[in-house]
C-alpha cells in the first residue's frame, strides 16, 4: 500500500522558514537545498518547506500542521506560553473545542500550526 509520507508548506524564504520551524519544534533539518528543506518526523514521515513563487502557491490556507500533545490542558497552555516567548504570530488563543484544548499560530508565510491534544 502507498501512503503519503511528506507534508510541504509553500514559503517565500525556505532558509528563514526552516530556522523558524527548527527553533519552534527544537529539531534540525534532515535534507537541505537552497529552496527546499525537510525535517524527519516520526514513522518515516517528513515535513518540508519549499520556496514557491506567489503565483504558483495557493493563496488561501486550507490546511494546517497539527502538533498533538499528551499531557492535557496544562501541557497545551504551557507550550502556548513558551511559543509566545518566541514571538510567534497568534491566530487563535488557547480555547476549548469538542476535541479538547487547542490554539493556532502562523509561520512567517501565514501557514497555520495547530496545537491540540492527542486523540
Image (cartoon, helix red, strand yellow):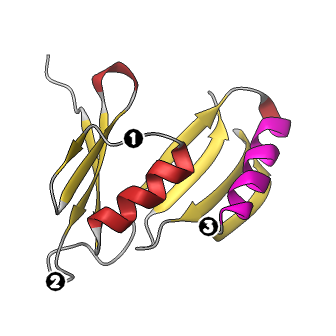
Residue 88: which disc? 3
Marks 2/3 in contact by CB < 8 Å: the verdict is no
Residue ID at (18%, 71%): 52
- The tag earlier along the polypeptide, 1 or 2, is 1
Q: Which residues are magenta?
A: 73-86
Element under label 1?
loop
Across and down, in percent, residue 21 comes to: 45, 53
Marks 3/1 in contact by CB < 8 Å: the verdict is no
- The tag earlier along the polypeptide, 3 or 1, is 1
Task: Locate the N terminus and report the quarter of the image it occupies.
Answer: top left
Marks 3, 1: nearer the viewer: 1
Nearest the camera: 101 or 67? 67
In reply to whether residue 84 is colored magenta, the answer given is: yes
- The tag earlier along the polypeptide, 2 or 3, is 2
Across and down, in percent, residue 72 comes to: 79, 31
Judge left or right: residue 3 versus residue 17. left
Residue 28: which disc? 1
- The residue at which mark 2 appears reads as 55
Across and down, in percent, residue 19 comes to: 42, 58
Amino acid at each position: 500500500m502507498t501512503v503519503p509520507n511528506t507534508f510541504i508548506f509553500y514559503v517565500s524564504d525556505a532558509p528563514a522558514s526552516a530556522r523558524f520551524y527548527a527553533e519552534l519544534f527544537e529539531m534540525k533539518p534532515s535534507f537541505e537545498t537552497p529552496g527546499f528543506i525537510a525535517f524527519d518526523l516520526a514513522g518515516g514521515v517528513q515535513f518540508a518547506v519549499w520556496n514557491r513563487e506567489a503565483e504558483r502557491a495557493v493563496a488561501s490556507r486550507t490546511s494546517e500542521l497539527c502538533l498533538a500533545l499528551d499531557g492535557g490542558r496544562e501541557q497545551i497552555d504551557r507550550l502556548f506560553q513558551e511559543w509566545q516567548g518566541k514571538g510567534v504570530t497568534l491566530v487563535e488563543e488557547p480555547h476549548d473545542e469538542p476535541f479538547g484544548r487547542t490554539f493556532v499560530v502562523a509561520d512567517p508565510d501565514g501557514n497555520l500550526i495547530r496545537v491540540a491534544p492527542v486523540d
